[in-house]
Amino acid sequence: MSRKIIHCDCDCFYAAVEMRDDPSLVGRPLAVGGKPDERGVVATCNYEARAFGVRSAMSTAHALRLCPHLLLLPPDFTRYRAASRQILAIYQEYTALVEPLSLDEAYLDVTAVDRCRGSATLMAQEIRSRIHAEVGITASAGIAPNKFVAKVASDWRKPNGQFVVPPQEVDRFVAELPVKKIFGVGKVTAEHLLRLGVETCGDLRGWGLADLTREFGSFGAKLHRLCRGIDDRPVAPDRERKSLSVETTYTRDLPDLEACVDALPALVEQFSRRMARLHDGETVHKVFVKLRFSDFTRTTAECVNPRPGPETWIKLLTEGYRRRALPVRLLGVGVRFAAATAPDPQLSLFAGLVPHDDGRP
Ligand code: DCP
Ligand code: MG
């Protein structure tokens, strides 16, 4: 039987919270991000700023060149987290099967829900109206039989819209999609596919499983299924985040250790931004650096360190590099979190004495 999955994604989330809290900002181009003189980047911007070409992850300096009267605000995660929790509580009134992906994005499996006469389309409509009424921002949604298609569909009618892909239309919908829409297909894989003459998921269907496995290793089997709109991943509620990392595949292999060390700061900076955005109070336990060499072998060097500094990353990189000492096609940096342990019963003795609040709403 086919499932009913909703992917909900708030519109220009950080900027929307800022406009809600200061209505004088509405209608003016606005970005949330770091300062231009501190090599800051845009975390997000409202749709007025997007009209000037401003985008997430762009340097703030560049954004200001595109839009000189752009208003720039520093991020305030306390208010973003509060809005995110409120939205999550709305989702949870519909189903326990809610899987948050970030502060502003979640999958809901509503297959067995009988609200709204069992219509996922109406549920998405109602959820979006409630987010607007109760949280004061707008969200868009995609409704489909699986996660992959629901996520793509939630972008289709942004902002403040929704798009349904019923089971019988999945095949046609996915055939038209550029391969870049497949999760895991980054710039390098997309270029690799383009060299093979593949631009859309439909083009990819001409390739057999054996050929895709030869070209892309174990990822080939995933491509073979996803390009046909097949995605059986379940919606996994309260999936505990075990690690957080970023990685880059380089267009040209980094020839030696020195080149890798040079590439490291940009990666660590990208990691720090991701950490600021997604980290929700878990305790960092280990740090790791991951390498994939030109012969596709991979290795990970890691150590226990709750507060990694630049020297830690370089030490791990050097250690990992020396294991093979070949040109490097991919570098990754990240942390693993300590496993959440049951609260110490001793502490409950003091429960009335310490504030529950840990600074977050
Ligand atoms: N974000 C960030 N850096 C990025 C991308 C996003 O800090 N490179 C933050 C800011 C966003 C939030 O995460 O508000 C949610 O990311 P989305 O990709 O969903 O972007 P928005 O919600 O801002 O816009 P959209 O309307 O396109 O969903
Ligand atoms: Mg969003």
Image (cartoon, helix red, strand yellow):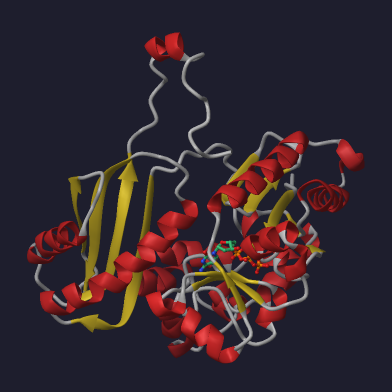
| Residue 119 versus residue 143 in the image, above or below | above
**Quarter of image, res 339:** top left
Q: Pick the residue in front: 190 or 223.
A: 190
> In the image, is 183 to the left or to the right of 315?
right
Q: In screen coordinates, is 136 left or right of 250?
A: right
Q: Is residue 203 above or below residue 325?
A: below
Q: Looking at the rendering, in which quadrant would you find the N terminus?
A: top right
Left or right: 339 in relation to 320: right
The one of 244 and 169 positioned closer to us in this rendering: 244
Residue shown at the point (17%, 73%) measured from the top left: 261
Residue 318 x %, y %: 11, 64
Residue 331 at least partly seen: yes
Residue found 70% across the figure and 38% down from its top = 89
Q: Where is residue 153 in the image (x, y as percent from the top left)?
A: 72, 65
Assign ligand 1 to one image quadrant.
bottom right
The residue nearer to you, when weighing 227 against 294, is 294
- Which quadrant would the C terminus be assigned to in this image? top right
Q: Where is residue 53 in the image (x, y as percent from the top left)?
A: 62, 86
Residue furthest right in the image: 117
37 on left or right of 5: left
Residue 140 visible in rendering = no
Give residue 128's position: percent from left, percent from top.
81, 53
Q: In which quarter of the image is residue 315?
A: bottom left
